[in-house]
Amino acid sequence: MSGFSFEIQHVDKHTGARAGIFHTPHGDVETPVYMPVGTQATVKGVLPKDLEEAGSSIVLSNTYHLFMRPGDDVVKKAGGLHDFMNWRGPILTDSGGFQVFSLAKLNKITDEGVWFNSHVDGSKHFFTPEKVVGIEENLGADIIMAFDVCSKYGISHKEAEKAAEVTSRWLERCAKAKTRDDQALFPIIQGNLFDDLRTASAEDAKRYASYGIGIGGLSVGEPKDVMYHVLDVLRPHLPENVPRYLMGVGSPDCLVEGVKRGVDMFDCVLATRIARNGTAFTSKGRVTVRNSDFKEDFSSLDENCSCYCCQNYTKAYLRHLVNVGEMLSAQLLSLHNITFLHSLMKSMREAILRDDLLGFSERFYESYKMDDRTF
C-alpha cells in the first residue's frame, strides 16, 4: 500500500480534538473535514469546479446505487469514478450496506451475505463481502468501506449482537478479498446503542484499521445526546494514528460535537437535501427562504458567508426561485450549504490549532439557533 498516511498536526489540549492531514493518492485532505455526498457519481446540483471553489477536498459515492445504475462495469470501462464523474480529488465509496437494508424492497441476511430485491426494478441480487469489494475495486475510489450490517434503532441487545458479529466476520472476508494496493479499506464499527457491543466491535475493527476507521449505525433515529454518549464510550477504544470517520452525520451542531469528541471525517446528504426544499444553514441557524417573511427581504442569505450565492443574491430572489420551482434555487442553496459546512470545519481546525475549540464551541452556540433534531 502506498500513498496513504495520516499526519496529526496538533491535538487540542482541552478536548483532544485533532487537526491533521490525510494523505491519499489523489491529494491531501485537511481534517477535520466534511465530505459532500455524490451518491450517484454527482453531488446533486453542484458542478465539480464549484465544489472545488467551495472548499471540497474529498467527495463520496455509493456502491449500491452505482451497482444498480449504470453498473460498476460501466464505471470501470470509463476509467473509474475519477474519470467518470470528472473529480480529480480523493473519493470514498460507502459499501452500500446501509442502502441494502434501508432501500431494498426485501432482504434476507445470511452468514454468507444478503439477498435483496432492488428498489429500482425489484430484481433479485446477492451481495457478499467479496462481491462488494469487487464492485468497489471496479469503481476505483481511494477509500473503500467494508460491507457491514447496519442494525435498526430500537432493536434488542440480542439482535444488535448478531448484526455486530456478522459485521465482524464480513470484515475479515473483505480484507482477504481486497486486491488493489491503491485503495484504503476502512472497517466499520457497529453495535447499535449498546456500550458493550460498541466497544467489542471497535476492538475487533481496530485490527483492520491500517488507514482509517468508520463509526456506523448512528444518526438512524436516536436522539442526539444518545449518539454523543456512544461517541464518548467509543473514544478510548479508537485508534489514535488513523482518521476516524462518523458516517451519515452532517448538521452543524453534530459536526461541532463530533469534532470535540475526536472525530476527523464526516459525511451527510443533509446539506443538499434541505437545499432542494428551500432551506439553508446560516451562522444564526437554519433559514427556510420559501417562507413569506422573506418576500421583500433584500439582504443576503448570510452576511458572514463569502459564497457565490450570498455575494450575488438576496433572500427575496431565492424565495422567488423556490416558490416558482426554478432549479437554480436548489443549485444556489446547495452551493451555499456546502460552503457553510466547509467554512465551519475550517474554523474548527483553526480553533484546534489555537487550543480554543471549547471557546469556538461556546461562540458557535451563542449565535446558532437550535431548532431541529436532524443529523
Image (cartoon, helix red, strand yellow):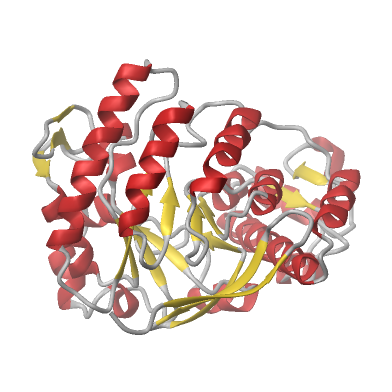
**Residue 139 image offset from top left, x and y in percent:** 24, 68
Residue in the image at 49% along x and 37% along y: 218
Q: Is residue 345 left or right of residue 99?
A: right
Q: Is residue 267 left or right of residue 53?
A: left
Residue in the image at 21% along x and 70% along y: 75
**Residue 185 image offset from top left, x and y in percent:** 30, 63
Q: Is residue 14 left or right of residue 185?
A: right
**Residue 310 image offset from top left, x and y in percent:** 78, 65
**Residue 82 image offset from top left, x and y in percent:** 34, 77
Asked if 230 appears above or below 2 in the picture, the reply is above
Q: Is residue 71 visible?
A: no
Task: Name the quadrant of the C terminus.
Answer: top right
The number of numbered discs placed on residues in the rendered structure image is: 0
Asked if 336 appears above or below 56 in the picture, the reply is above
Task: Name the quadrant of the N terminus.
Answer: bottom left
Q: Nearer the viewer, residue 214 or 364?
A: 214
Q: Is residue 259 visible?
A: yes
Residue in the image at 39% along x and 78% along y: 4
Residue 233 found in image quarter: top right
Q: Nearer the viewer, residue 192 or 119?
A: 192
Residue in the image at 15% along x and 76% along y: 77
Q: Nearer the viewer, residue 141 or 74?
A: 141
